[in-house]
Image (cartoon, rainbow, N blue to C red):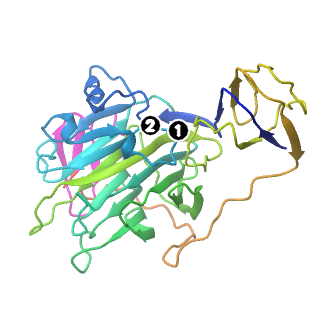
């Protein structure tokens, strides 16, 4: 059933609609500034993020927060993040520039079917180089990730595309233009070993662009990198690069396609469509009625100090099935899961690491510290 509620007049209310369960919330809503990331350490694991993969400069050289950095359509976020690579962004003596945040959580973000949400944007100022490979929003085993710039080993000099990759293979791509927000959700089924891709731009709702692809969904729940790793390339010097992030969270159940995100405020002067499964509101509510909670499958919370008469109508409706169209370069036919080997620059060991520990042919698992070894 669908309940259409029209709020009119002067209303002091807040409406929160969440499609399903948010397992981990990385939307920076509780941060006063990026320096809050410094509160986290291996001995004091607090906050939503682990912050240890970065250069030697202060945190504000690499991460900054501002309402102007978020997708304007993402009303569930108070602010977004600007993640920066500069000439000091070398972590732990490596030759790659890296600024990355890791979810700090014990929630089951690597079990069953879950959706990893984020929005990404670049500007012409401090634009990511098109001449070097960038690995974005990736897992340690690189079973799924975004990539931008010239891909290592490819022909040519530069590449303007933003790509979604599975096991290093491009399954979807688009020209990465400046000032365009790309809204993304990885649909990962850790039980079935598949991953699908949802995407939209600006404020448009997410639609599924690529059907589930078979892959080895290896994750220990603490190896999704919200940030970027840039591979070195001889003859192409470093330049400052900025990546803008918004709406970062992980949920289970049905996917939230609204870019506003779970818990976003709703304009009380507009119609609100709420799927009702377990409760039915009466067809009319008198003025000055105060109501606080409506329990539905979609965890709807409505609070009001004054509500004008409400007109309701019910219609029998079901959500349309996910869009499964793909671009001409995308194969929607799952392939057999690959052998579990770690790619170049991927993690291959460390305390609590549960991913691939064997490196691809020609690579060696090099010890960096107790928490991290890498295929080189």
Residue ID at (10%, 45%)? 93
Q: Is residue 349 magenta?
A: yes
Q: Which residue is mark 2?
A: 27
Q: Nearer the viewer, mark 2 or mark 1?
A: 1
Q: Is 245 part of what is drawn in magenta?
A: no
Quadrant position of residue 338:
bottom left
148 left or right of 287 in image:
left
The reply to whether residue 139 is visible in this rendering is: no
The image shows residue 129 at horizontal and vertical percentages of 23, 64
Quarter containing the C terminus: bottom left
Q: Compared with residue 175, is residue 1 higher up or lower down, i.e. above or below?
A: above
Q: Residue furthest right?
A: 283
Q: What residue would you read off at disc 1?
A: 76
Q: Position of residue 229 (x, y in %)?
A: 26, 53
Image spot of residue 236 (x, y percent)? 12, 67
Is the stretch drawn in magenta largely helix, strand or loop? loop
- Hey, which quadrant is residue 334 in on the image? bottom right
Q: Badge 2: how crowded within 10 Å, few (<14), some, or many (20+)?
A: many
Using the image, determine if residue 169 lies above or below residue 356.
Answer: below
Q: Is disc 2 placed on a helix, strand or loop?
A: loop
Which region is colored magenta? 345-374
Question: CA separation, marks 2 and 1?
Answer: 8 Å
- Report helix, strand or loop for mark 1: loop
Q: Name the mark on residue 193.
A: none
Dot 1, how many residues are within 10 Å of its Cα: few (below 14), some (14-19), or many (20+)? many
Q: Is any part of residue 277 visible from this angle? A: yes
Label 1 near label 2: C-beta < 8 Å?
yes
Marker count (numbered) = 2
């Amino acid at each position: 059933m669908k309940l259409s509620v029209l709020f009119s007049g002067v209303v002091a209310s807040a409406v929160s609609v969440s499609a399903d369960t948010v397992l981990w919330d990385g939307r920076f809503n509780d941060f006063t500034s990026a320096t809050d990331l410094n509160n986290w350490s291996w001995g004091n694991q607090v906050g939503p993020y682990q912050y240890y993969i970065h250069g030697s400069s202060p945190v504000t050289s690499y991460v900054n927060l501002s309402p102007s950095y978020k997708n304007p359509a993402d009303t569930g976020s108070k602010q977004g993040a600007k993640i920066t690579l500069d000439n000091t962004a070398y972590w732990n003596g490596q030759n790659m520039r890296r600024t990355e945040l890791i979810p700090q959580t014990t929630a089951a973000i690597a079990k069953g079917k879950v959706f990893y949400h984020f929005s990404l944007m670049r500007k012409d100022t401090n634009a990511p180089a098109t001449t070097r490979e960038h690995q974005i929003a990736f897992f340690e085993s690189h079973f799924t990730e975004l990539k931008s710039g010239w891909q290592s080993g490819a022909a040519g000099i530069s590449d303007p595309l933003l790509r979604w990759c599975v096991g290093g293979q491009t399954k979807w791509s688009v020209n990465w233009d400046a000032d365009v927000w790309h809204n993304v959700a990885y649909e990962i089924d850790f039980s079935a070993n598949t991953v699908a891709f949802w995407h939209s731009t600006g404020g448009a709702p997410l639609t599924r662009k690529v059907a589930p692809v078979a892959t080895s969904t290896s994750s220990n729940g603490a190896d999704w990198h919200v940030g970027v790793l840039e591979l070195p390339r001889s003859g192409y010097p470093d330049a400052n690069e900025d990546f803008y992030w918004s709406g970062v969270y992980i949920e289970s159940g049905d996917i939230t396609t609204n870019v506003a995100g779970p818990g976003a405020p709703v304009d009380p002067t507009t119609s609100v469509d709420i799927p009702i499964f377990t409760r039915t509101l009466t067809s009319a509510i008198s003025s000055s009625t105060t109501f606080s909670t409506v329990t539905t499958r979609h965890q709807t919370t409505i609070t009001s100090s004054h509500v004008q008469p409400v007109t309701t109508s019910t219609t029998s409706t079901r959500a349309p099935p996910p869009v499964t169209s793909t671009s001409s370069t995308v194969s929607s036919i799952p392939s057999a899961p690959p052998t579990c080997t770690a790619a170049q620059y991927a993690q291959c060991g460390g305390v609590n690491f549960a991913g691939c520990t064997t490196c691809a042919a020609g690579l060696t698992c090099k010890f960096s510290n107790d928490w991290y070894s890498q295929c080189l």
